Amino acid sequence: MALRMSGGRALAVCAVVSTLACSAGDRTGPPPPPPPPPGTHIGWYVVFPPYGTSGGTGTTDSPWDLATALAGGHGRIQPGDTVWIRGGTYVGSFETSLNGTAAAPIFFRQYPGERATIDGSLAAGGSSLVFWGFEIMQSHPTVVVDRVLEANTANGKFINLILHDAGFSGVSMGADKGAGVELYGSIIYNNGFRDNIDHGIYAHNATTGTKYITDNVLFDNFARGIQVYNDAGTALQNVNVAGNVSFNNGTIATGSTRVNVLISGPTLITGMVAADNLLYFSPGIDGVQFRLGNYDTSDSALYNKGIDLENNYAVGGDVGIEMQYQWASATVRNNVLIGDGGTSVVRTGGPTPGIYDWSGNTYYRDPAATAWQQNDTGYTFDAWKTVTGLGATDAATAGTPAATQVFVRPNAYEAGRGFVVIYNFAHQDPVSVDLSGVLIPGQHYEIRNVQNVFGAAVASGTYTGALVAIPMGGVAPPRPIGRTSPAQAPRTGPDFDVFLVTSPAP
């Protein structure tokens, strides 16, 4: 483990604050050391410098600094232990290679009710480690020029993090590292500054284990939201992209091809899953919702071996599903693609796409429009089905849905937490939402727009079991920190927005 501090940079600190309350702006002078929290949780303790030190014992009254804890706390941290990270800012590039066990992982968690921020990066190796609930960002991304997170812990979990303003892609999941890793429930935005290179998540997998990208929210990253890719010579396999919300990625750039989810590469691709994802581009944005398969060679069927695309919901953009080169095996079922007058809902290709299991998909696009393509030729819906042999049970209708569509995603790891995704076709304000899958009666809750996740709640109260009204006025997207972005991301409300529901931790 090593800690690398940027030379000459002033230490930034933030007093212990309530959850989601303190902004990542300028901070002057360290506050008094925080007292031991009431109802102290069992485990080891980390506090920002100068109150946390390498010479501490890891207790509430003698805490470690973060680097010491990530190095193992002088051998004290053992499998099954929890390290509580107190509220404050931890400046630097941090690393760890600790090893928990499958039965007893080591937890690094933000202390409940506080906001802990790494201003720099975290390179997480080792095995069976869990990182939960804190923020990683870069206040000087053009100086640090690094990812905020390298999620390479074998059988590791990265849960409910807030990851933004990286100099490179926000998250890296290495090709030959981190078998069994899961990135879950995180909010990932404004990462990168290089066209077509810097993404919210850049994942690859050459291992036999599966990597999981699950229930995250990604928006306004410089190129793609999720890029699953590998170079020639190394297999790309077993990546499960499920339940994510990805919108308006590439919109802060002028030269990036805007793609919300990409799974591709000039290499053998197999075992890919993209299911239950919710995607969106604002009106007038010419993005691609799904770009699937190697698109650099006419022999793509030699590389594109297997993908499962099911139960996704995508609105807007120039293209819904792009599979312009043949897959040896593909399941494309029960997806909903909602376009506008300029959308090609499907682009397929290859000599024999009829081998696909392609059924039950719904397209909101005029079936008489030439919005279905095969080998770069546009067809009407019925003609495309005839030419390709696909979509016998698919359905197409002109226009858009009449009713507002609401998706509620309870958090699998944290009770009282979840995402609400609203496609506001009916232009309602507010929208009434059933949160019974997230909250229980008597529970206090707060709801924030994910594009202002550290700002004021748009709704709060004590849950009674009744529908909860969520305002749809929208917010201005967060501007990238430390960069002059060539473009401003569009405001999504009132047409679409994503909200984070939280409640006090037990």
Image: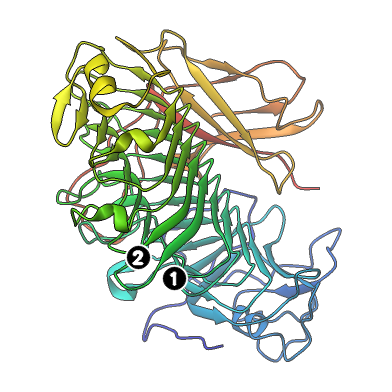
Q: Which mark is residue 453?
A: none
The structure residue drawn at horizontal position 60% and vertical position 64%, both measured from the top left corner, is 180
Q: Rounded to the nearest whole Å, what is the CA distance between mark 1 and mark 2?
A: 7 Å
* Spot occupied by residue 89 in the image (x, y as percentages of width and height): 54, 68
Q: Nearer the viewer, residue 53 or 171?
A: 171
Is residue 311 something that shows in the picture?
yes
Look at the numbered discs 1 and 2 and tell me whether their residues touch, using CB distance below 8 Å.
yes
Is residue 294 something that shows in the picture?
no
Name the side, left or right, on which 497 lies relative to 79. left
How packed is label 1: few (under 14 Cα within 10 Å), some, or many (20 or more)? many
Q: Earlier in the sequence, mark 1 or mark 2?
A: 1
> In terms of secondary structure, where does tag 2 sit?
loop
- Residue type at mark 1 is Ala
Name the side, left or right, on which 17 lies relative to 354. right
* Spot occupied by residue 146 in the image (x, y as percentages of width and height): 36, 72
Name the side, left or right, on which 495 lies relative to 75. left
Count the marks.
2
Q: Nearer the viewer, residue 281 or 319?
A: 319
The structure residue drawn at horizontal position 61% and vertical position 34%, both measured from the top left corner, is 409
48 to 130, vertically: above or below? below
318 to 39, vertically: above or below? above
Q: Which mark is residue 230?
A: 2
473 to 318, vertically: above or below? above
Q: Quadrant of the N terminus?
A: bottom right
> In terms of secondary structure, where does tag 1 sit?
loop
* Spot occupied by residue 497 in the image (x, y as percentages of width and height): 44, 30
How packed is label 2: few (under 14 Cα within 10 Å), some, or many (20 or more)? many
Q: Nearer the viewer, residue 270 or 193?
A: 270
The structure residue drawn at horizontal position 71% and vertical position 49%, both measured from the top left corner, is 413
- Residue type at mark 2 is Asn
Residue annotated with mark 1:
175
Q: Hey, which quadrant is residue 50 in on the image? A: bottom right
